[in-house]
Amino acid sequence: MREYKVVVLGSGGVGKSALTVQFVTGTFIEKYDPTIEDFYRKEIEQFASMRDLYIRNGQGFILVYSLVNQQSFQDIKPMRDQIIRVKRYQQVPVVLVGNKVDLEGEREVSPSEGQALAEDWGCPFMETSAKSKTMVDELFTEIVRQMDFCPLPDRSDTCCSACSLQ
């Protein structure tokens, strides 16, 4: 059985853990404690090389923003830049995700904004809800498909060429 190393990145409170737990266990984490998230984020920022290590060891990346938070959408762009910097090539298996589609009435990021960014990056885009389990299984199925379609070069490979995800 093949093991896939997927890294889920995004700002605090966008639903990274909720999406992952929903996929793995089929349950939604209702309670969110931002104090713990803030502490965790502060620790990670103190050890910035930790994120580089996660990226270096990752095979596929899920970049999550909250569609009810425009700033989280802006925050996702430097995260992709960091992936490219650490991986040293342009095309890596990535899925861009707008989470919290169940909060449609509070939307700040339009589907067309997410789609345009995904097209610019040459990656799939989807909107999900960890709470209602909307597109959660499809999200993880898609990142696995991307990893199978465009495997990352071996670490020993010094070539920076990459296959296209399109």
Image (cartoon, rainbow, N blue to C red):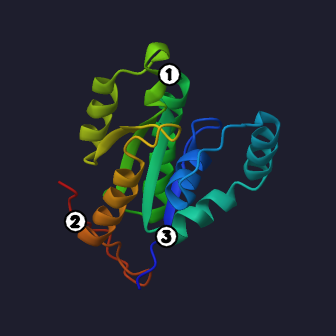
Distance from disc 2 to disc 3, alpha carbons, whole Å, reads 19 Å
Q: Position of residue 69 (x, y in %)?
A: 53, 23
* Residue at far left of view: 166
Does the image show residue 54? Answer: yes
The residue where tag 3 is placed is 5
- Mark 1–mark 3 Cα distance, whole angstroms, equals 28 Å
| Residue highlighted by disc 2 | 163
State the SS at label 3.
loop
Identified by mark 2, the residue type is Cys
Q: Residue at x 51, y 41 (%)?
A: 130
Quarter containing the N terminus: bottom left
Q: Residues within 10 Å of mark 3 (few under 14, many from 20)?
A: some
Q: Is residue 21 above or below residue 116?
A: below
Locate residue 16 relative to residue 62 in the image: left or right.
right
Q: Nearer the viewer, residue 165 or 14?
A: 14
Q: Quadrant of residue 4?
A: bottom left
**Marks 2, 3: nearer the viewer:** 3
The answer to which of marks 1 and 3 sits earlier in the sequence is 3
Q: Which residue is mark 1?
A: 70
Residue drawn where x is 55% and y is 54% of the image: 20
